[in-house]
């Protein structure tokens, strides 16, 4: 199957059908967008800690129009927040994370030569690429990019009179999002079908590594929830451009009474969050999967309670479809509905708690090896605990009344979703880099990267809870308009300090990544001593993954330190001994 | 000049990094083993760091709590706010204990079970149904308690008795608030958004006789100990009326009316004594609504019945306002 | 990939794709339900053309079933596929007719004379038609392939996929139509 001799540059690097190359395309695009999104957050953090002060960087990046005299324009502030959220949620942690690891790992770990359809896979990337181009274009339009928040609630997102970003910028946002949705649907279809059909002999569903389960469930979530966002956006597009009244009603703006009657903005919120909440888990589950893998390999211990881990993944995925109302407790919804959503939301804490306990049990009496990937996996467990617990406050409708849309929420979701998923992504990159590029990433730089990131990330997001409990709303350009928030500047300065430190240290990661691709030390075939199939492939990249036959699977993926063996891991391809129990 | 400087410095930093990494790799080559493979001494160092940083993190959380507690909202100034605060205290104690407990376990395990020598072996332990059952059922029981308690509070807030409450309308638009009091007849006049304009900023139907004595104000005055029913409307886009001191928040949605009932319990004067002279209650906007979202506010005053009556008397009725306009 | 695996894989791709499309329409129709429970909702009577189009799309399905039978028995199904294509085109024409009779009734998509109900009606039928156009393209491709004798007794995956998708459109339309009849 090694037919890569007659590849051209174009077919190898650009329009590649090979899943490993497509994964790298997703990863590098995702990393690029990550840098863009991170930079945006640092720009608007400068304004938050030093309201109204002049910064040369702001003018340098944003120009005279959006940062006159180096002071951030309030419209641009909202635009930056919106683009930051959109980019990180969808571009980095949905496409960048799932796109990379689903494409890279699925065929390798289940023992397949490639995805079910390489062509659909390639399309998926190029739709994503087109979406990226459109989204970035919107940064350069005259009225600025979309500025109604990543949740694009109408009427704000529908009326350019309400905020300039809702003009062309919002159009481009919607186009980009449509392309993005097409991309993730194509990807998702492929992942599901591949896992269902192309497993090698012996690889039953119950022998799948957990990261496969996670990616499988994520694909299902995506395929079922993204179309609903598409229908919500479709109706929004009609309202914006053709003057229908799905979401708009009884509006007087800029001195003019609009003709729209009979629409309901709340309808949009329902449709949006029907996607929006599963989306949160679309971000989180792959990280949960990756971390399960990394923790087990580096504790040299089987993951504790494999079955419970799979069931809790399923439970989380299922529940995520019936909790969307917790974003809408104070929209005037029927109080009974509010109770139902409180109930379902707090239920999610149970499978989440099971996951945490099982991680801890996996570490217990392990033989823990602190690779950079392992450190990030540990960071994940910590942020998942911290962020999950504050979710209990937000999911309780009575408590949500006073913290809804405050910085408490910003702290909560950054920790549980942003940091956890980013840590999962870093863990995955450090762990599978040797498989991706045949080189090792530098360990020391990895350590420094982890520690500075871990400390500064908590330094950024933990104090935000206090801002929220002091009543500070999110999406505020500055907190100077209210005497009651005056004391908070001090906290804001701390946050910005850590944000800058945390931002800068990512340069180290990017450096490490690219440096190691070219000059890293050569990796051995199975540097972490891992049992799963991907480590049985040769180091060189070949089409079809295995030069000869695809190996057959004889056991589950977690035989680490199994009694009766000399080495501390037994690859999945090894037959069970006489009388040996599987697990 | 500074730009050149920055470029030069960044360049030098990159060069230094490259050199450092190179040196590490060369040393590895000399010792004939891959410098990037994790060794026992790495494990010792990293797990020790984990313990130190982890404990520092936990300590810093305690520090943050004590340092910033005074900045948080004062205890609630409304009847239902008090029960929200109680629920909050209960939930916080619960989650903070779990937070510390789990993190201590995490850091302890990481330190204790590091691979410290070649002989150190992990214990092959795949599952334990009994244990897993316990740690499914225990959170389930605790959460049932949290849910029941929470729903009870929610129910008391949303099903509050409105029969005694005085009705006040709160109206949001880009970027300000106004309040409308029903006047003598205790009835708010009807409205239509097509009537908005000029002096009639709220689109009130002047042909409705209930409207004539309505009073539109730029401040929200409330009576201590008397329940109010806020009716919320919006002129243009979604706003959210947020009064953090009262634990009150409700969206204002164009095309519909939402409501919230509560009873203020502390006058502004009392709060000034507790919190300092510059204390004021506010109503602020908490739903992204455009360029001046961060400054969309209205002063809220809680006072005694007499003060309130005196204040209300001074406000012009709608008919007076519109007549003087004409 | 061997033929069997290819068959199941492509069919699954299609099935999951259809699940996705179903959720898209579920989104739209649940929006209608939410909206119609609020005040100011006015019902619209369906134009008779939508009844005709229902018949025609079912007829298209029947022709596709026959063509699958035909190819299985080793004969060339091109004629039947062509007939189903004709049905599909007629369906599209009837949809346009239906819209123009709505316009005659004074029920517009936007502007004066439109209501949320009528706007939803147009959006839903329009979104369905977009999917039908996809179906027509695939019927057309199957047709040219069968004219060029690309199918055989053993290998008729294209016809199968096309007819599964068309049956789906068919059932989807019946659901939507019933929904529109009762809710709008
Ligand atoms: C250096 C790291 C980061 C910093 C300093 C940062 C900072 C912030 C701040 C301060 C806000 C709130 C602004 C406001 O509401 O006024 C915000 C919003 C947001 N951030 Fe981040 N963030 C970072 C990383 C991330 C990551 C990793 C994610 C991925 C989930 C993320 C997702 C979001 C989202 C979804 C919003 C909401 C946007 C909106 O309101 O429309 N951020 N960020
Ligand atoms: Cu949610
Ligand atoms: Cu506002």
Image (tube, coloured by chain):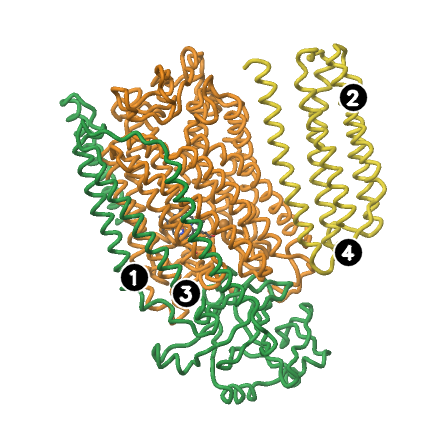
Chain colours: A orange, B green, C yellow
Above or below — where is A480 with respect to B37? Answer: below
Residue B290 visible in this rendered orientation of the protein: no
The residue that mark 3 highlights is: A471
Identify the image quadrant of residue B49: top left
Q: Position of residue A371 (x, y in %)?
A: 26, 33
Q: Chain of mark 2?
A: C
The answer to whether tags 3 and 2 share a subunit is no
Mark 3 beta carbon near ligand 1 (under 8 Å):
no
Mark 3 to mark 2 CA distance (whole Å): 67 Å
CA gap between label 3 and label 1 equals 16 Å
Q: Are marks 3 and 1 in contact (CB under 8 Å)?
A: no
Evaluate if marks 1 and 2 touch, with contact meaning CB atoms under 8 Å apart. no
Where is mark 1, residue-wise?
B65
Image x and y of residue B277, in percent? 35, 80
**A141 horizontally vs B211: left or right:** left
Q: Pointer 2 and pointer 4: residues touching (CB < 8 Å)?
A: no
The C terminus of chain A lies in which quarter of the figure? top left
Q: Quadrant of residue A450?
A: top left
Task: Tell me if residue B37 comes above or below residue B204 in the rendering.
Answer: above
As measured in the structure, the alpha-carbon distance from the residue carrying label 4 to the one carrying label 3 is: 43 Å
Tag on residue A534?
A: none
Residue pointed to by mark 4: C42
């Amino acid at each position: 199957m090694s037919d890569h001799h007659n590849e051209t540059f174009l077919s190898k690097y650009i329009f590649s059908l090979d899943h490993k190359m497509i994964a790298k395309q997703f990863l590098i695009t995702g990393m690029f967008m990550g840098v863009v999104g991170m930079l945006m957050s640092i720009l608007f953090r400068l304004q938050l800690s030093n309201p109204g002060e002049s910064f040369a960087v702001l003018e340098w990046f944003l120009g005279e129009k959006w940062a006159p005299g180096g002071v951030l324009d309030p419209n641009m502030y909202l635009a930056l927040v919106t683009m930051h959220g959109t980019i990180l949620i969808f571009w980095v942690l949905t496409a960048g994370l799932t796109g990379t690891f689903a494409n890279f790992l699925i065929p390798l770990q289940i023992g397949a030569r490639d995805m079910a359809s390489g062509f659909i896979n390639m399309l998926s990337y190029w739709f994503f690429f087109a979406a990226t181009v459109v989204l970035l274009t919107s940064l350069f339009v005259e009225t600025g990019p979309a500025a109604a928040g990543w949740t694009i609630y109408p009427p704000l997102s529908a009326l350019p009179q309400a905020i300039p970003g809702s003009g062309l910028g919002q159009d481009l946002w919607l186009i980009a999002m449509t392309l993005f949705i097409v991309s993730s649907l194509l990807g998702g279809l492929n992942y599901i079908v591949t896992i269902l059909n192309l497993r090698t002999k012996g690889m039953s569903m119950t022998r799948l590594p957990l990261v496969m389960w996670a990616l499988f469930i994520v694909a299902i979530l995506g395929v079922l929830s993204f179309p609903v966002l598409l229908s919500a956006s479709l109706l929004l597009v009609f309202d914006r451009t053709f003057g229908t009244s799905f979401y708009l009603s009884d509006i007087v703006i800029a001195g003019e009474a609009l003709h729209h009657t009979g629409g309901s903005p709340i309808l949009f919120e329902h449709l949006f969050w029907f996607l929006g909440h599963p989306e949160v888990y679309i971000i989180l589950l792959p990280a949960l999967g990756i971390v399960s893998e990394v923790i087990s390999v580096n504790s040299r211990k089987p993951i504790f309670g494999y079955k419970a881990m799979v069931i809790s993944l399923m439970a989380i995925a299922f529940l995520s479809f019936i909790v969307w109302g917790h974003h809408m407790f104070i929209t005037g919804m029927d109080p009974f509905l509010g109770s139902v959503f409180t109930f379902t939301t707090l239920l999610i804490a149970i499978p989440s708690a099971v996951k945490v306990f099982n991680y801890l049990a996996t570490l217990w009496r392990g033989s823990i090896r602190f690779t950079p990937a392992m450190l990030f996996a540990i960071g994940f467990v910590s942020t998942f605990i911290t962020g999950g617990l504050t979710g209990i406050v937000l999911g309780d409708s009575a408590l949500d009344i006073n913290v809804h849309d405050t910085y408490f929420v910003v702290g909560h979701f950054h920790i549980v979703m942003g940091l956890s998923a980013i840590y999962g992504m870093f863990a995955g990159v450090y762990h599978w880099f040797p498989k991706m590029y045949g080189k090792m990433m530098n360990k020391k730089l990895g350590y420094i990267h982890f520690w500075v990131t871990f400390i500064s990330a908590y330094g950024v997001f933990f104090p935000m809870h206090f801002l929220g409990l002091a009543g500070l709303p999110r999406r505020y350009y500055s907190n100077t308009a209210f005497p009651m928030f005056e004391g908070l500047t001090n906290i804001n300065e701390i946050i910005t300090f850590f944000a800058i430190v945390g931002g800068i240290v990512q340069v180290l990661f990017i450096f490490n990544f690219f440096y190691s691709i070219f000059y890293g030390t050569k990796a051995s075939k199975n540097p972490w001593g891992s049992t799963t199939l991907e480590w049985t492939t040769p180091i060189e990249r070949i089409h079809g993954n295995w030069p000869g036959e695809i190996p057959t699977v004889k056991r589950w993926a977690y035989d680490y330190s199994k009694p009766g063996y000399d080495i501390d891991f037994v690859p999945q391809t090894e037959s069970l001994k006489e009388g040996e129990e599987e697990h | 000049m500074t730009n050149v400087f920055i470029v030069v410095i960044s360049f030098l930093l990159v060069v230094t990094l490259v050199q450092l990494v190179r040196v590490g790799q060369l040393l590895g080559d000399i010792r004939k083993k891959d410098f990037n493979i994790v060794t026992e001494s790495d494990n010792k160092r990293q797990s020790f760091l984990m313990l130190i940083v982890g404990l520092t993190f936990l300590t810093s959380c305690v520090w943050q709590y004590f340092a910033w507690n005074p900045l948080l909202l004062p205890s609630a100034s409304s009847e239902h706010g008090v029960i929200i605060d109680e629920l909050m205290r209960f939930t916080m104690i619960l989650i903070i204990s779990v937070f510390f407990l789990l993190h201590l376990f995490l850091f302890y395990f990481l330190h204790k079970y590091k691979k410290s020598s070649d002989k150190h072996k992990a214990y092959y332990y795949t599952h334990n149904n009994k244990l897993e059952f316990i740690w499914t059922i225990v959170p389930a029981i605790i959460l049932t308690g949290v849910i029941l308690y929470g729903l009870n509070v929610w129910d008391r807030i949303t099903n509050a008795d409105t029969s005694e409450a005085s009705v006040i309308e709160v109206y949001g638009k880009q970027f300000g608030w106004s309040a409308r009091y029903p006047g003598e007849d205790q009835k708010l006049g009807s409205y239509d958004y097509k009537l908005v304009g000029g002096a009639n900023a709220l689109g009130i139907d002047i042909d409705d006789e209930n409207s004539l004595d309505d009073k539109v104000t730029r401040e929200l005055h409330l009576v201590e100990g008397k329940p109010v029913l806020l009716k919320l409307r919006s002129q243009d886009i979604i706003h959210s009326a947020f009064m953090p001191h009262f634990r009150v928040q409700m969206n204002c949605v164009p095309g519909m009316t939402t409501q919230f009932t509560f009873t203020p319990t502390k006058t502004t004067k009392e709060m000034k004594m507790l919190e300092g002279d510059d204390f004021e209650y506010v109503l602020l906007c908490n739903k992204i609504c455009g360029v001046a979202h961060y400054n969309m506010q209205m002063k809220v005053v809680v006072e005694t019945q007499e003060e309130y009556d005196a204040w209300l008397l001074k406000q012009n009725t709608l008919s007076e306002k519109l007549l003087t306009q004409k | 990939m061997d033929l069997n695996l290819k068959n199941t894989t492509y069919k699954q791709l299609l099935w999951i794709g259809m699940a996705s499309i179903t959720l898209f329409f579920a989104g739209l129709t649940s929006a209608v339900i939410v909206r119609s429970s609020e005040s100011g909702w006015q019902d619209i009577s369906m134009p008779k053309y939508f009844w005709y189009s229902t018949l025609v799309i079912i007829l298209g399905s029947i022709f596709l079933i026959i063509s699958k039978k035909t190819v299985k028995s080793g004969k060339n199904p091109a004629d039947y596929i062509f007939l189903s294509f004709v049905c599909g085109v007629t369906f599209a024409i009837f949809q346009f007719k239906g819209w123009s009779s709505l316009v005659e009734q004074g029920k517009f998509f936007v502007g004066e004379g439109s209501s949320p109900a009528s706007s939803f009606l147009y959006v839903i039928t329009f979104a369905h038609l977009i999917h039908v156009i996809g179906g027509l393209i695939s019927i057309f491709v199957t047709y040219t392939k069968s004219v060029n004798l690309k199918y055989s007794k053993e290998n008729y995956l294209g016809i199968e996929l096309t007819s599964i998708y068309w049956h789906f459109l068919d059932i989807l339309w019946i659901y939507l139509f019933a929904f529109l009849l009762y809710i709008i």
